[in-house]
Amino acid sequence: MAKDFLKREENYSKWYNDIVLKAGLAENSAVRGCMVIKPYGYAIWEKMQAALDKMFKDTGHSNAYFPLFIPKSFLSKEADHVEGFAKECAVVTHYRLKNSDNGDGIIVDENAKLEEELIVRPTSETIIWDTYRKWVQSYRDLPILVNQWANVVRWEMRTRLFLRTAEFLWQEGHTAHATKEEAIEETEKMLEVYTEFAEKFMATPVIKGLKSENERFAGAIETYCIEALMQDGKALQAGTSHFLGQNFAKAFDVKFSNKEGKEEYVWASSWGVSTRLVGALIMAHSDDNGLVLPPKLAPIQVAIIPIYKSDEEYKITCEKAKEIKKELESKNISVKLDDRDTHKPGWKFNEYEFKGVPVRIAVGMRDIKNKTVEVARRDTLEKTSYQEADIANKIEHLLEAIQDNLYQKALTFREDNTTKVDSWDKFKEVLDNKGGFILAHWDGTAETEEKIKQETKATIRCIPLNSIAEKGKCVYSGNPSEKRVIFARAY
Amino acid sequence: MAKDFLKREENYSKWYNDIVLKAGLAENSAVRGCMVIKPYGYAIWEKMQAALDKMFKDTGHSNAYFPLFIPKSFLSKEADHVEGFAKECAVVTHYRLKNSDNGDGIIVDENAKLEEELIVRPTSETIIWDTYRKWVQSYRDLPILVNQWANVVRWEMRTRLFLRTAEFLWQEGHTAHATKEEAIEETEKMLEVYTEFAEKFMATPVIKGLKSENERFAGAIETYCIEALMQDGKALQAGTSHFLGQNFAKAFDVKFSNKEGKEEYVWASSWGVSTRLVGALIMAHSDDNGLVLPPKLAPIQVAIIPIYKSDEEYKITCEKAKEIKKELESKNISVKLDDRDTHKPGWKFNEYEFKGVPVRIAVGMRDIKNKTVEVARRDTLEKTSYQEADIANKIEHLLEAIQDNLYQKALTFREDNTTKVDSWDKFKEVLDNKGGFILAHWDGTAETEEKIKQETKATIRCIPLNSIAEKGKCVYSGNPSEKRVIFARAY
């Protein structure tokens, strides 16, 4: 185990940060708020990208690429949008540097000032809808189902590795439709895609819902989201899908002639997830021994470690380890055989445990004699001796079992930490002592939501899509309510 | 065929631009010099990325991600580097906008001025070597074999879609080594990877060589490159691999203790290719009927078009087309079945021809009766009737034949357009009337190179790695020379 590694209950925040740093996932850079994603962390993001990209393509989307820069005036075109994004952005004002006159370095060349400043994209609705105007004339040009993998910048003041960084990587889908119904259908379809990804790949159960007006995306008519619960009882928004109505089409004058030859504004959706999901993944499953990764997103699914005492034994155990590696790889299992003789087996055990590798296989002389291998699973830390015969199939099933177990464990945790609350005192008590999701009645007003936030730092995470109609009284104001919503403190 | 489409000989430059626009590959955006890569163009880039990424990983590299922004002071740390990159870069000076006092829009908030300006990366050596300092202590931490897929910005004044844009997408490998030999070996290995990619995937023969000092990457000891010849007789640099010596290690103080415990500076390489390769691909093979794509990089390898006169025939031909599609897909061939009844077959034929789809299959009633399909290949425009039996195997072989043919054709073109020249008059004559690669003696001085460039716009594309020692006289100065180098006008 890494040195000086704290338990979750000692200092959750430091525990998280230490996993990110000591497992080699990411680190801070010389640029305030921007992180370096290290190879092991980036490999997790690549696995996420591959799974999501396939799901996007299977649902009819194509990738494209739009400019990094957005002319300043574009931001102002959609009234709500500018309020949400102008406050924290990187502004490009010049296009050249020059040597300073006194010869001690380079300075901005004041003769190279841009006529109009450029904003480094915080999100791309504006530049994309400016482009779509040229792509759409008739209903035959619709729908446009486009996604972009890109970097974006939001000048956050308080940053945390993966969870909140000034620059982050994400995908942003931007679709254009002939009808409102179709745009809403798309918005909901992509929420389903995100849900499936979170549950099947990240092994993280999520609650699907709508954001309240306060929490809605700047420029959206309706924001759908999925909310996950972390081990410290705080919520994390794991993906959003926005129904944008005709707001951006109107702002950028994107019209089409419908089947009857009449001009109409185009309907829109946008949806995105980011490298923040890597942070969610870390927090959802990891434990006091370090990172725990679900097999479907683990860059290394199985680590094989030979155990030996002599050069002769080294040769024999490595030979067997290579054999097993080859067998596992024939099942598309990603395997790392660690045959370095510069490190002891115990050191390696700790290393792969801390890095969250789902399965560790040790191959020693006694194993070879007995035609067995020692198999340790990261989620339960159990060790078992497996007969070597048919090992690839057995490991394949074990990886599936680990994936399922992580999901079930996270689901049980969420169920244990979701509390129905019917009074304000109870609300505060649960929030402070237990945390988690609080299901409570809310009067539907932004004022109440704001007051609750001010008093407790809890926000409405979502109005669940599957909530059951239930008459009640707002936990704060006592005014009538039709259904419960989910409150929590959040990342 | 697209309307108003010029032949290559009428206006090569417009011919190129029209292919990019009319085949839906890319277009200019509202931001000067920045392009929008449209889905069809991006799909080609994705195919390139997939092939290259696999080759990088097969040679031991991992991907990572470093910040978009570079502190201004970092650029100055390597003396040559700053000269090369400070001249044309996007400078971030502020981090917030605000509503203007007169209420007519948003303006830069002067209270949100950065203490130190940030440069949008034109290349990442500086920020990466600032990071490597933290990663390297001992020889055990080496080598570092890292690649990054990213966007970069160079403020070009004259831009052309794909070939030269202010923002472009690329990959940049940055490796760190314990010895000079190892770093040079890496530099050469990656040049081989690029060569293999250009020849096997892009079907484009390239000449491997070294850049002259004038053309070297700012901060490199030696720049290796591959040079391809376009159909208008101009050269295009298709990839570079730089041996950086200890320049960046010294600039950023990256040292390691070697096996003897002595401190040394780390040795470096960097190497990159960009979306410019999409431009090269277009120019290398396309013809007066539009885009021609090599099968290995074609987003759609086969288009199937049903030919019918009635609803009944539509049903029957589509049924057969689907059958064939399924068969082809079982061989991992990417197929588009165009069963739209809003467009006539002739229109579709032109569409897929213009878009460079390597193989087109037409399925009509007579074909079905005869158990045949009509197969047209894009490279030669030949049409042949194929027996339907074993169609997937036949098409698989046809795609291979097309890939080979495109490469051979490009190779023959290059050979026909490479001229040995031994006098200055001949040099100018060949350059103006024939173009292409000119193999000529050069005296090795930067002065001569510069004068040749001023008089003819031709530059030394490379000093070929495989050049044969041959005593001669410099084509310009008459001074002695040991070998021929390649001159050409270039993109």
Image (spheres, coloured by chain):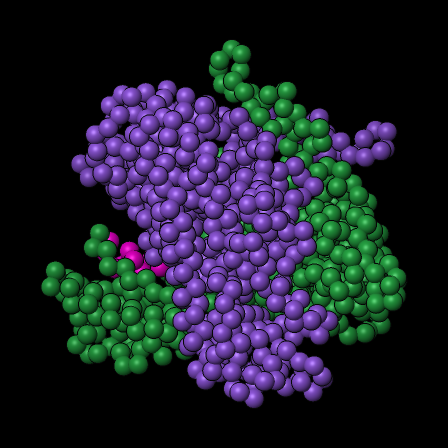
Chain colours: A green, B purple
- Residue at the limit of the structure toward the bottom, as seen here: B369
Which secondary structure type mostly characterizes the magenta part of the structure?
helix
Position of A305 with respect to A131 (left or right) is left
- Residue at the limit of the structure toward the top, as seen here: A102
Position of B434 with respect to A460 (left or right) is left
Q: Position of residue A40 (x, y in %)?
A: 42, 53
Q: Position of residue B200 (x, y in %)?
A: 38, 57
B323 relative to A215, above or below: below
Q: Quadrant of the N terminus of chain A?
A: bottom left
Position of B55 with respect to A83 (left or right) is left
A194 relative to B447, above or below: below
Q: Position of residue A361 (x, y in %)?
A: 30, 68
Residue at x-position 69% and y-position 71%: B344
Q: Is residue A285 visible?
A: no
Which residue range is magenta in the image?
A343-352
Dividing the picture into quadrants, the one containing residue A337 is bottom left
Q: Position of residue B381 (x, y in %)?
A: 51, 64
